[in-house]
Amino acid sequence: MKKTINTTLRQMHRFGNSLSFVLFYGLSMLPIYADDRIIEDPMIELSESVYCPCGCVRETIRACVCGTAQGITLEFQTRLQSGETIEGIREDYLGKYGTQFNAVMLAQGFNIVAYIVPFFILIAGLGIVSVIIARLKQRVKGPVRATLTKVDLSKFNYQQVEDELERYKRD
Amino acid sequence: MASEIGQATIWLSAFSALWAIGMLAIGLRNRNNNAIISGRNGVVATFVLISIAVAGLIYGFLTDDFSMRYVAEGSSYYQPVLYKIAALWGKMSGSLLFWLWLIALFGTIFVWRNRHTKDSLADYALIPISVVMLFFTILVSGLIRGVYNPLSRFPNGGAMPDGAGMNPLLQTPSMAFHPPILYVGFVSLTIPFAFAVGALISGRINNDWIIRSRRWTLFSWLALTVGITLGGNWAYRELGWGGYWAWDPVENASLMPWLLCTAYLHSVMIQEKRNMLKVWNIILMVLAFEFTILGTFITRSGVITSVHAFAEGDIGVYFLSFILLSLFIIIGLIVSRWEKLKSLNWLESFLSKESVFVLNNWLLIALTLIVLWGTLWPIISEAVTGQKIAVPEEFFNKTVIIPGLMLLFLTGVGPIISWRKLTLSNLKRVFTKPIILALILLIPTISYLFLSGNIVVKVRSVYTVLCVFFSVFVLVAIADEFYRGGKLRSKRHEISLLGGFFRLIGRNKRRYGGYIVHVGIVIVYIGIMGSKGYFLLESKSVTNGQSIEIGKYQLTLKRGFEESHPNFELSGAEFDIKRNGKYIKTMQPARGFYFQAGQGEQDTIESAITHFGLNDLYIALGPLPQDASDYVSRGEPVSVQVYHNPLISLVWVGVAIMVVGGGVSMFEKNYKYNVKTDA
């Protein structure tokens, strides 16, 4: 019976490891496919793609309720109606106010590093944690255990152990 | 006179902090009890001196002494008393003085609480506390370029007649409480940090320091939780963009210590139970403290632009130097104590509570690093490409969601998995029910996503499904823990099930308080999922009688209105709200016009928020003249932003539950540590 349980647990460990691998690594890949919301209205797409320059807390033109945003919204509407492209208007806007007002950070050019690093942190971190857990666990299995137990015991205050045993017997 | 006395006490406090460091070092080295007591008194004296300085500054605010530069720049004659006091931490040097006062206060409480202990750990811990006090005393002394002494007067006897006044955006009750509570959270982390450093200096690397700093850590965590949430609530109510979290650098700066503190609160349990991760716990606590200083560096150095930041002068260099120097010293201490920091036990299984806690720590650290990375990315990018950029909210949302969901899952696994090794019986007993119920509840979720058409939005739906599955799993797992424990208690003591629950919590406040926090976290997750993932926004200009539709609500502009207040006037528009054609309520969003000398008129957004169950209807007005009633009746257009924020109330409810759980956990009477002799 004990053997069966051990075998089952061993299998579960293997299964757990595979599951963790699939879960963690698989989930890590998800954002690459993140298409977020599908924006059909070009005005919304444009006004959500740039920040308002009024000094607000990084609010897009669509979210900001200041007079500046109102004026820019009207300008965007007029230019879109006259047939200008979203990209063209955005470029003009960022040229006028500065690239720090760009509210879209695509995973392109140098920005790709920004997107890769978080997943590297996650995956490398998982690797480090796996190694730590494995090393912590190996110590129990290996022949080192006896030596370590000796070291371990020497670190205890023997008197304290004796006292605790005594108290345990009394209770 | 208050100014002169205050300035003198700040200088004197620098000497008393230095005295404390010197006397404690001498006393501990030579085992001289008198020197140690003198060092402790130095800490108390610093507190008294800084309290006098703070009282002097408050006196300046209350008496409108506008010859004091800080008072003139942060207050005005018209400012209500609450905001005159709140102006104390409204700008750079005053906020640093307030920070210093809090360290001195906590240092004094620390001295008082440890007055009868005969061991040296507390005295060793007083050294880093005094060093931090000294550092902040230097910052507010007026020696650093760009940071003047908050009690100093204008040069050459100048004054500002009525004061410039506090930024009207900050004149709200939540802003009067949000910064000080956040500061309390940041500053109180100095105590567990000091315990960790004290343990390293003294070589007493056992569990003493974690047991004795446990309440302080929980207190910091609670204050940070409340402070961060109040900040989010302020942003939601005052900024008019319908959200509560924008991943602004300063918001991030407050979140990072919270994440590290949360990681520490978990990993410390492994040390207590299994005598493992000693070095890791010290590193975590040191990092949590250093990140509070890093946050201050981000806010005040000007290295990153943020709406919250008040960058002036050379202060950033000092903060950075302090962080690097302290890290250098602590790394040296860790290396010198390496042998004592080794684990005494080892992991028995991958599937155990210890492993889950290690994974939890990894995720929390990963989240911290990701947030730090996103916060610093504009600097890195500019250094490489030469282009200034801002990291949008979307970047953070995309990158934190995966570790966030994994963490949610572990929130349920952690409490139910057994220590040492997960056995087959434990697996069956505790995991089956939550998993089955979570799977069952996925059916209505997926059905809703199909019916509402949201299933076409692929990735968001996957996140929603995972969030619902994990949330239900956690809630059922924790409810089952409570039920089984409560039932057992009720049987044993022959009391009701409810009585059994209370007895259960009362007997192990730390454990069950922690579970309550986990329930709160799950509720916050659901709130974030609804409000961030499924909000609706309509922007439109309407004239009198015209309507806006959002979801099942129709808003009709009815009239304009004005309202007078002592230091500002409201000018707004009234909307009739109908749901499915049936009138339910009137809402009154407005703009606030503050009249203050030297500041002219500044209008603020006074959003109207109505809760419909767990959802909010949120209206913010665009620019509006002060005569709104005439303006609207003339048929002029009013620019309106309307948000429908589903489940947003759960964010606030969840945090309230977390605070209750944290409070319960904090009141655990497990302070069994009784020091009688020096180690």
Image: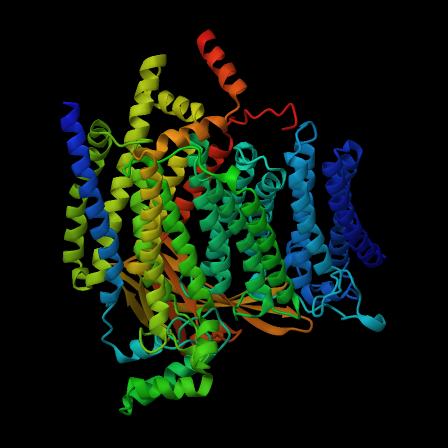
Residue B179 in view? no
Residue A32 in view? yes
Q: Camera-side residue: B496 or B252?
A: B252
Q: Camera-side residue: B397 or B523?
A: B397
Quadrant containing the C terminus of chain B is top right
Q: Position of residue B577 (x, y in %)?
A: 33, 60
- What's the coloring here? rainbow
Q: Position of residue B91 (x, y in %)?
A: 64, 63
Quadrant containing the N terminus of chain B is bottom right
Q: Position of residue B239 (x, y in %)?
A: 47, 65
For image coordinates 74% across by 33% down, the residue present is: B31
- Left or right of B467 on screen, residue B206: right
From what the image shows, is residue B137 above or below residue B22? below
For image coordinates 47% across by 68% down, the residue present is: A57
Q: Quadrant of residue B517?
A: top left
Q: Quadrant of residue A1?
A: top left
Q: Camera-side residue: B640 or A69?
A: A69
Q: Quadrant of residue B247?
A: bottom left
